Image: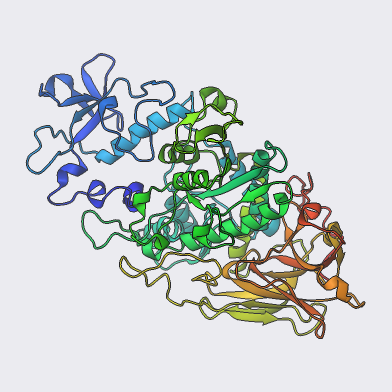
């Protein structure tokens, strides 16, 4: 199994695999502590591996304190706590040394363990010692919440039609299992349909196809189960009403700390992946074809979707700046859209149009643009772990939390910088050369909302197997085939939903980005011109299910049935077009047409969110002849039309109802008073 960092291209091939001519780079040293009796050097990676102290040559330079090694990890700290100088690798020594040039290495002391594995272990000791007083292995409470709540929601939806189990890329003994082992259990128990899911915000080939499906299929093949399963996948949680609601709560905590009317630059920050490929194969190559990666398009569309929510909810209270000075709109390079786990060297194209900006680049750009309040809003990581608490901060020059902060559960940080320097300084609101910044936490405080959204994204893939929720009076009025590249449509011809229609757009750029390579590519630039439409071929349907239609009154008068478009929470990049019939007998007056709006049901809030206009789409279109209205969306679900009240704004209509919903014994408690009929 190739190591994670080598797959990502963070380290070259020859460090992950023995390669002829550069074998020494794979294994030339070891990291050890002395045994309590002083007789042995004991490997920190595998305590069974020992060297007798008397057998280690007394060669100058052969034994080096670990803290004196050059930090080999871009994403990790090494030995020393930058807050107070504590040496977490005190007593750890490197015996041997990596080659320092061509020719024999007189300091080589290979021990059979890949050097990068030992270095990763030492980095982990450092990082987790910075974050925790107790290094006993345990799951994050947020991970436990996501697993518990997601499983519960799925069983409430589907009953015993499904079996839900969890796996991991890298297991922790007694806590988690390899995803491959979980898949093998399913195979041996006779299952033949498998839904593979990821809790990642942003759909990417690396996580979904390479690390998840690729490893599962490889394990099944090696065990004699090749071609045994048919698969469906749920590839991301971002861009849905539930995800946007949870992230809205994260943002609210930080905006609420500012005076009303403040100008705030919002730097939406996601993971980031390299782009494009390194040219050619060989020992410096990375196996994943980054130029073909769908991540960049999906992650940016997720940003635009949330941007609409934040603008709608807070735009009348703060002057939110998503764009560079003098720019507006949704084009990527005009926005402060940031990659947190990237450095400029990850983007090898010379043309600025084909590059992506890092968080630090955007912080510095926003400061030069005259922004004096900056909110770094994290959107990819579902819990406050090593990446958001340490890796991003190291790579992007963000201050760490204090020990007291971490002990008290504070994961966000506030600090000030001067315009011309990333060094933290004392905050002084009267000094115009000083900028105040906030760096957010992730979703730990909103695990319920996140998990409800995650479960309903998984519902998408389950429904593609023809398995539907029970107990919510779901009925289907029309079906139709959708082709991944050719698109398709479904329309209800009769009955209460007559006139309801779903159109999935054709792929505007067939073969892209799949045909891209290291020399022929273009970076995603404009969400009004997505490369991809549907992510898969599937059978679409139109129907109804129990939903709280009475809550549409939060916005005004409902004038259509609540119509279910599925598979539920299907996501597309080129917007789909939905048409809904007007069901009230009265005429929609001319003065009401401008107040006619589409809404989508939010499973986490039990309310109805406005359907915001996707990039490049037209606003809602009303046809008085057919008494229908059409609008565009990137996410399927339950939709309805409302003539909104005079003076309506999204802020007045947003609701988050507790405790009905996930805490109820039955998800349908309180929901059976209204259906689509």
The residue under the point 54% across, 27% down is 406
Residue at horizontal 31%, vertical 33%?
45
Instruction: Name the residue furthest left.
Output: 103
Asked whether the viewer can see residue 391, the reply is yes
Q: Quadrant of residue 100?
A: top left
Camera-side residue: 177 or 673? Answer: 673
Q: Is residue 107 left or right of residue 304?
A: left
Question: Residue 562, position in %: x, y?
Answer: 79, 68
In percent of width and height, residue 218 lies at 37, 59
Where's residue 507, x and y in %? 51, 77
Nearer to me, 144 or 439:
439
Residue found at x 52% / y 29%: 401
Relative to 125, residue 116 above or below: below
Q: Residue at x 86, y 71 (%)?
A: 592
The C terminus lies in which quarter of the figure?
Answer: bottom right
Q: Relative to 473, say whether 403 is above or below.
A: above
Left or right of residue 515, residue 54 in this image: left
Q: Is residue 75 above or below residue 453?
A: above
């Amino acid at each position: 199994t190739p190591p994670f960092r080598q797959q990502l291209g963070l380290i070259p091939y020859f460090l992950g695999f023995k390669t002829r001519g550069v074998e020494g780079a794979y294994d030339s040293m070891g990291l050890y502590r002395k045994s309590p009796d002083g007789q042995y050097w004991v490997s920190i990676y595998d305590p069974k591996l020992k060297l007798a102290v008397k057998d280690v040559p007394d060669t100058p330079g052969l034994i080096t304190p670990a803290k004196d090694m050059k930090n080999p990890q871009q994403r990790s700290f090494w030995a020393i706590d930058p807050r107070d100088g504590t040496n977490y690798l005190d007593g750890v020594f490197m015996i041997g040394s990596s080659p320092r040039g061509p020719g024999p290495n007189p300091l080589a002391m290979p021990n059979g363990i890949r050097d990068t594995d030992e270095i990763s272990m030492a980095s982990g000791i450092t990082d987790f010692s910075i974050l925790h007083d107790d290094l006993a292995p345990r799951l994050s409470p947020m991970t436990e919440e996501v697993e518990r709540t997601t499983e519960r929601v799925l069983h409430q939806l589907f009953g015993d039609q499904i079996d839900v189990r969890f796996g991991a890329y890298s297991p922790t003994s007694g806590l988690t299992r390899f995803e491959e082992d979980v898949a093998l259990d399913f195979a041996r128990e006779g299952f033949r349909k498998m839904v593979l899911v990821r809790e990642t915000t942003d759909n990417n080939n690396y996580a979904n196809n390479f690390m998840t499906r690729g490893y599962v299929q490889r394990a099944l093949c090696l065990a004699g189960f090749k071609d045994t399963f048919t698969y469906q996948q749920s590839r991301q949680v971002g861009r849905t009403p539930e995800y946007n609601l949870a992230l809205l709560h994260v943002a609210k905590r930080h905006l609420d700390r500012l005076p009303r009317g403040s100008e705030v630059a919002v730097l939406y920050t996601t993971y980031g992946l390299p782009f494009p490929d390194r040219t050619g194969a060989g020992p410096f190559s990375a196996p994943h074809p980054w130029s073909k990666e769908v991540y960049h398009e999906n992650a940016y569309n997720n940003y635009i979707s949330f941007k609409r929510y934040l603008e709608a909810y807070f735009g009348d209270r703060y002057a939110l700046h998503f764009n560079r000075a003098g720019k507006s709109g949704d084009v990527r390079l005009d926005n402060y859209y940031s990659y947190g786990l990237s450095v400029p060297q990850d983007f090898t194209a010379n043309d600025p149009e084909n590059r992506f900006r890092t968080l630090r680049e955007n912080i510095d750009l926003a400061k030069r643009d005259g922004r004096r309040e900056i909110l770094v809003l994290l959107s990819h990581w579902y819990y406050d772990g090593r990446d958001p608490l340490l890796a991003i901060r190291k790579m992007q020059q963000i201050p760490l939390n204090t020990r007291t902060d971490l002990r008290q559960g504070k994961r966000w940080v506030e600090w000030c910088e001067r315009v011309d320097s990333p060094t933290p300084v004392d905050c002084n609101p009267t000094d115009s050369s000083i900028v105040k910044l906030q760096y957010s936490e992730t979703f730990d405080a909103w695990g319920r909302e996140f998990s409800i959204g995650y479960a309903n994204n998984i519902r998408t893939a389950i429904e593609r197997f023809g398995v539907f929720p029970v107990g919510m009076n779901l009925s289907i009025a029309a079906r139709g085939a959708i082709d991944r590249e050719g698109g398709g449509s479904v329309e209800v011809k009769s009955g209460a939903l007559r006139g309801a229609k779903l159109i999935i757009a054709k792929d505007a750029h067939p073969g892209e980005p799949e045909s891209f390579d290291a020399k022929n590519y273009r970076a995603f630039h404009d969400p009004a011109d997505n490369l991809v439409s549907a992510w898969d071929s599937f059978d679409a349907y139109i129907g109804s299910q129990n939903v709280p239609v009475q809550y549409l009154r939060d916005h005004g008068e409902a004038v259509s049935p609540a119509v279910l478009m599925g598979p539920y929470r299907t996501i597309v990049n080129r917007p789909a077009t939905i048409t809904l019939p007007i069901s009230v007998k009265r005429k929609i007056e001319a003065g009401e047409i401008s107040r006619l709006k589409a809404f989508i049901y939010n499973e986490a809030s039990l309310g109805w969110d406005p359907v915001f206009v996707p990039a490049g789409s037209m606003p809602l279109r009303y046809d008085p002849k057919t008494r229908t209205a059409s609008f565009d969306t990137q996410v399927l679900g339950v939709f309805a039309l409302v003539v909104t009240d005079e003076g309506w704004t999204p802020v007045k209509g947003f609701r988050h109802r507790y405790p009905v919903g996930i805490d109820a014994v039955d998800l349908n408690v309180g929901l059976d008073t209204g259906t689509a009929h």
